Image (spheres, rainbow, N blue to C red):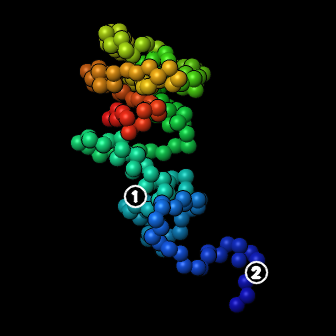
Amino acid sequence: MKYSIDTLCVQQNKEKRSTQPHVLPLYATSSFAMDNLEEGIEIFSGQRKGHVYGRYGNPTIDTVAAKIAAMESFGCDFEAAALFTSSGMSAISTLFLGLLKHGEALLTQGNLYGGTTELLLKILEPQGIEVVFQDLKKLDEVESLLKAKKNIRLIFGETPANPTMACVDLEALATLGKKYEVLTAVDNTFASPYLQRPL
């Protein structure tokens, strides 16, 4: 049977490929095929793991996310998960916009990465999210703010800070957060889980 150029363009490649590469392959596909309708229903309904569209993940992303989660939680007595985004700033904005709403406040340090500060002042504050800057090394002042400002929902630290390399006591901050039922998050870009594990 002779196919048209249209059919040739959309036809799946038929050659056999190795299924055991030595290095994790990069999945550049936008979508994934399913064997049958039932498989699709099970994957879309969450009854079965699988991939449907590159935006929602692929085997490369799943494997790397699992590795990062294992590194971040190394030595912990619980399992962690990781979520991939397209950049560090998209991860930070997802964190802030996912946790904070109008009328709530974020407690953070003044010496943050410039892009984070810009996000706080130009995106969060105009949406009615209060940003409270405080030297997070001064734990007595942090605690006073947590006592006084009941709308603080998140303590956000960056340690070591970019570009000053200033560090804060993450364990002490997390302890204060738990005491006042405030979430604590950290940008661990500089140290990485090899040198510092905030979890």
Residue 5, how many percent across, how many down?
A: 76, 77
Residue 82, how many percent across, how many down?
A: 41, 45
Camera-near label (1 vs 2) is 2
Q: Nearer the viewer, residue 177 or 129?
A: 177
Question: Is residue 104 among the parts visible in the rendering?
Answer: no
Residue 185, located in which quarter of the rendered image? top left
Q: How many marks?
A: 2
Q: Earlier in the sequence, mark 1 or mark 2?
A: 2
Q: Residue at x 54, y 59 (%)?
A: 26
On the image, numbered disc 1 is attached to which residue? 46
Residue 4's tag is 2
Type of amino acid at the residue the image marks with label 1: Gly
Residue 136, located in which quarter of the rendered image? top left
Q: Nearer the viewer, residue 92 or 100?
A: 92
Q: Image quadrant for the C terminus?
A: top left
Q: Image quadrant for the N terminus?
A: bottom right
Q: Could you give the CA–CA distance between mark 1 and mark 2, rounded to whole angstroms?
A: 38 Å
Secondary structure, mark 2, is: loop
Type of amino acid at the residue the image marks with label 2: Ser
